Each structure stands twice: as structure tokens, then as C-alpha cells.
Image (spheres, grey):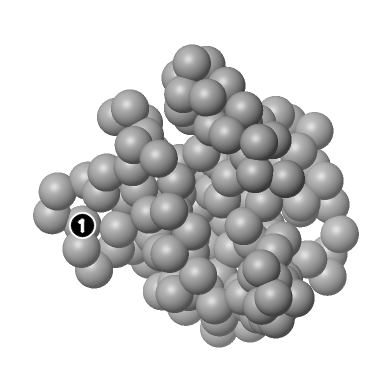
Amino acid sequence: MPDDNRPACVEDVHELALGMPHVTVWPGTEHKPVYQVGGKSFVFFRNPRPDAVDPETGERYPDVIVFWVPSDGDKEALVQDEGSPFFTTPHFNGHLSVLVRASRLGEVSRGELAEIVQEAWLSRASARRGALWLADQETRS
């Protein structure tokens, strides 16, 4: 896509998540969507929680988005750089997901965000659905 290099935004999260096959939005979460495949969440918008707070003010972050990742290695790759917008909290220790504040999405490109959403979807979709989607992507390239 020609706009893959532009900074990502919240609308891209919604568009990319809904663009994956077999996606549903958990009922009643229109304002803080929970995107699922096969009944499993792969991206969701969190309510402010005590584990994700501004270190200077102690205020809870109101704009945290959670993305599933395929492995601990993938998680580490996204959160190890302190300059990265992706982070984790002790609450998510042992959980295959990373967090990002919506206000920092512009620090990654739309193309990078697309890869993260696709990997999140693949990590939660059934093996059959994942294989079909990957095969379809290969025929398109």
C-alpha cells in the first residue's frame, strides 16, 4: 500500500483488525473494542488500569491497546528498546501480549502496525484459518 510508511493511528488499528478474516467484535465493546477470531481476542482496547500509569503523575493511561504476539521472543523484541512505544507491565508477565498507548501509535508506521495486527491475528486464529490466510497472501504477492 502506498500509505504504509505514514505514521500509524488508532483508526488503522480498527481498519486492520476488521480487515482480517473471520473477525468479530465482542458484543458491548463498541467504545473499547475487543477484536476476536474464533472466539479468541487478538487486539483489544483496555480500560484504564492500575498497572499502566504515567510514571510522573501516577495517572492511569486511558488509551492502552493490547496486541497478542506469537512468542516470548516476539514480545521481547517489541518491548526491549526503551524508546519503543510498546511496553508490558508485571500484570502481563507470562502473557503473550504487548501494550501500546494510542497516543504513541504514530511512532510506528502503518506498515509496521499491519504486521503487528496480522501476527496478533495469526497467533490466535486456528491453524487452518492461519494457513489459508497465509496461502492467500502468497498468491497476492
- The answer to whether residue 51 is seen in the rendering is no
| Residue at the farthest top position | 128
CA neighbours of label 1 inside 10 A, class few (<14), some (14 to 19), many (20+): few
- Residue at the outermost left position: 28
Image position, residue 54 (x, y; %): 58, 76
SS label for mark 1: loop
Q: Along the line of sight, which residue is nearer the eye, 37 or 96?
A: 37
Residue 134 location (% of width, % of height): 62, 31
Question: Residue at position x 62%, y 28% from top?
Answer: 135
Residue at point 64% right, 61% down?
113
Amino acid type, label 1: Thr
- Above/below status of 20 relative to 104: above
Instruction: Give the percent coordinates (x, y) of residue 3.
Output: 66, 77
Q: Looking at the rendering, which quadrant does residue 5 occupy?
A: bottom right
Seen from the viewer's position, the closer of residues 69 and 60 is: 69
The N terminus - image quarter: bottom right
Residue closest to the eye, 22 or 135:
135
In the image: residue 141, left or right of residue 100: right
- Image quadrant holding the C terminus, namely top right
Report the residue at 46% width, 24% height from top.
129
Q: Give the residue pinned by disc 1.
A: 29
**In which quarter of the view is residue 63 placed?**
bottom left
x 86%, y 59%: residue: 81
